[in-house]
Amino acid sequence: MTIDQLMNWIPFGADWPALAFFAAVLVCALTVFLFIAVYALMAIYGEVKISSFMQDKVGPMGQGVGFHAGKWGLLQPVADAVKLILKEDIIPTLADKKLFIMAPFVVFIGAFISFAALPFNQHTVVSDLNIGIFYILAVGSLSVIGIILAGWGSNNKWSLYGGMRSAAQIVSYEIPAALSIITVIMLTGTLSMQGIIEFQKGTIWVILPNWIIFNNPFSFIAFFIFFISGVAECNRTPFDIPEAESELVAGAFTEYSGMRYAFFFLSEYAEMFVISAVATTAFLGGWNSPISGFFDGPGWGLFWFMGKSLFLVFVMLWFRWTFPRLRVDQLMSICWKVFLPFALVNIFGVAIWSLIIG
Amino acid sequence: MSDEQTKLIQEAVAKALAGNMDMINNIEDRVTRSKAKAALVKAKREAKKGAATSEETPSEEIVQAESPPEKSLNQKVAEAIEKKFPASLAGDDVDGHIQLTGANWFEIAHYLKDNPDFLFDSLQCVTGFDLGIENDLEVRYNLHSMTHNHTIEIRIQTDRKNPKIPSVEQVWRIGDWFERETYDMYGIIFEGHRNMTRILLPDDWEGWPLRKDYETQETYHGIVVQKVKDGWE
Amino acid sequence: MGIVHGDLMTLNIGPQHPSTHGVLRLKVKTDGEIIADVEPVIGYLHRCFEKHCENVTYDQVIPYTDRCDYIAAMNNNFGYAVAVEELMDLKVPERVEYIRVIVSELNRIASHLLALGTFGLDVGAFTPFLYMFRDRERILDLFEVLCGARLLYNYIWVGGLSHDFPNGFEEKIIDFLDYFEPQLDEYNNILTFNKIFIERTADVGVMPAEVAISYGVSGPNLRGSGVKWDLRKDDPYSIYDKFDFNIPVGTGTVGTIGDCWDRYYVRMLEMSESINIVRQAIKALPSGDVHQALPKKIRPPKGSVYKRTESPRGDLGYYIESDGSPIPYRLKMRSPAFTALSVMGEISSGWMMSDVLAILGSLDIVLGEIDR
């Protein structure tokens, strides 16, 4: 469902193309926003429950009727959302009000507009840009501006620390992530998300699906570099030093409350999904079925895409509840001294591999 | 107390003195049991007293008959201090603790820490002490040697009106906080301490709380401080 | 570490902060992420313990000692009881000694679990914290069965105990130990030998032995620096000389001797030693009475005593001066956490922001005991 198709369906599309375009964009934006909101609620519930199972406890539970978290705590995320909406919105007196108010939206926009290029199945993509993956990498960095704004605008030392750490971290980790994506682009020869997925149809090595992760040893490594860099870009444990609740209280978000804080939260989850979706698209065959020729079709496509992405989201949660946190300098040295050289070698490796074998 | 009880207690105490505690422990009534035990303690104490008076003379003879006893650690330390820093001992009695005048205390501390015979490398505890409303203040240092595994206690008295003692903060680093705490509670100024400020109480607290003549300030930042009622213990 | 001496930023960690383990304030001077100076500011939890003690009888002091180190209240009661008994030259029944050792070793395990769990939390590992609290909860349940309280026990009294063991309590302890012993491996798997955890703690906050001794640091922190010093072995009190156990010391397995990881690992090893001691004590537990015959109001003879015992945090000393009345003339508590915190400024300058909290966590402080 690209925007063009939507425009064709709109009856007045031929007469007022500009109006139709805006209507189509609005419909897509609302759908994506709704998707993010529902997904975030599910992810919060998932995070609470998964962490509970990992930590040998039950998490939110409720029995019978009344004001509580519902069966198995299913209503807990709803309660959380209601709480966040109703909470008092506090803006510190000495904060830079404009920046302080702007920051959550900037962060959210960064995650939100990335969804425009995500191919959910063969047809469902808001806009199949010919530079799709490049676009996602580019707008993904918007959030760092928002976090710096939040850190600076709060006029709080902890926030400033969080903001600066976050800026350094996200900017650094974008480099290995982008370099790993380059290996994919070299193999597929296209920047379009759908094009990359189309490339991965069929099988390779007789039984394995023709996914880029299985294409050659270098792209196998590239997947892990991309995914770990992605975790770092989302500021999740073990790379959550910008928030680091035991050090920086809540980092850049220390002074935020209520809905503004919820927006940061929402964008964190949205960004996790985007990173997972890009990893799925670029390395795990996107909406392609793992068994070539079976379970194909738009419905299955959506299932495979969501399944793979959500599995990667689950892996991120798994990381969070298992690992301690790294220190700032260790984080940087991993990025610059390990990931970057490996990513560069990968590029050469893939190039040589394609020349000789491919 | 009924006659029966008295009889029971007497019997039980007699048995207990002979070494059989079961009877006392088996008394069912709690009150009677505790009374019996009290009686037992009394009986034991009397027995001890009697034994002590009868054995006093011979035991002294035994001590004298032995070769001169080895010097205790306290004596050794006191002698060493007297030799190196004359006139800094404040008393001859060195049983249990060594009393110093406070002069040269910093140097003595260094000496005790570095002397290979003693090597008191650890300052265990610094206790401020009030000898009474009319009397002086005192500071007690418990020193310990990790190498030799021995301990001594050193006491230094100082004038109540103008309490000053040399600081040993630069000898044992923990002295820093211990002395600040003592200053906080007793107002004893440790000369040479690099940061002589209150540690536990707020900086604007009035008075020295652990002195025996301490009186609570009436208001603190405009809050009326409640007086302890008379007769409270 | 090259510290550029430009303008330093002063940062207050606490008194309200997620990882100060209570109400502690660290006045930190930072140069970017690097710490130039740390000055702990204490006293936020000062409750006049020593002044209170000069106004209550010897027995009534015991609940106050509970509230000093509320993580290891049994050990505090124990130390106080031992000190008063030494002052009075009192011998307590053998069963009492054994029970005291059992409960204080169990409390040592509980205290170490809390210390290690919150240390994990300080470096960002959330799950081990909950695992350790789950097991600590079992010890607290045992204590609840024993004396009705979960944290402030008031169990060990001068000359005895408040209650004897309830029926079948020994089996309950053995059940717990059987359950708990394999759990130590689980902790090791999830936290101790985790690569990131080692990265964060090895070689960080190194405390050389001389510094530790000069600052009066004791207990696991001192042993972490490689000094084999444990009052249970070196100056045995109660009946600790009857048990066979090792004193683990820091060896610098993954880093330098005396780093945060060593302090952590010493505690981990000490837990299994405590299990060992409890097993031996239960096997040898004699029967008998748990109360020494004492008058209602204890009046120790005139004199003073300084008695040290080994609490989970180190050398816990009580200096007691008696003037022959039923009320202590002066009671000073030498708290191990107080000395451990004083070394903070010395060992944490030059490290990074995150390390300061790791170092603080590895010292295992309890503010109730520091401020008293």
Image (cartoon, rainbow, N blue to C red):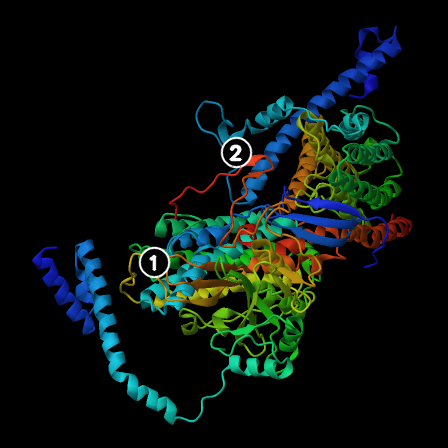
Query: Disc number at residue C161?
Result: 1
- Measure the alpha-carbon separation of dots 1 and 2: 41 Å
State the SS at label 2: loop
Residue A246 relative to residue C240: left or right = right
Residue drawn at x 73%, y 23% is A32
Judge whether C104 appears above or below C248 on screen: above
Q: Position of residue B128 (x, y in %)?
A: 54, 61
Q: Amino acid at mark 2?
A: Pro
Q: Amino acid at mark 1?
A: Leu
The answer to whether mark 1 and mark 2 are in CB contact below 8 A is no
Residue C21 seen in render: yes
Mark 2 crowdedness (10 Å alpha carbons): few <14, some 14-19, many ≥20: some
Q: Chain of mark 1?
A: C
Residue C101 seen in render: no
How many marks on residues?
Answer: 2
Q: Chain of mark 2?
A: A
Q: Position of residue A196 (x, y in %)?
A: 82, 36
Q: Quadrant of the N terminus of chain C?
A: bottom right
Along the viewing direction, whichever of C162 and A330 lies nearer the viewer: C162
State the SS at label 1: strand
Q: Position of residue C74 (x, y in %)?
A: 43, 56
Mark 1 crowdedness (10 Å alpha carbons): few <14, some 14-19, many ≥20: many
Q: Give residue A87's quadrant in the image.
A: top right
Q: Give residue A204's quadrant in the image.
A: top right
**Residue that carries the numbered disc 2 in the rendered image:** A60
Q: Position of residue C328 (x, y in %)?
A: 42, 58
Residue drawn at x 81%, y 31% is A194
Residue furthest left as drawn: B3
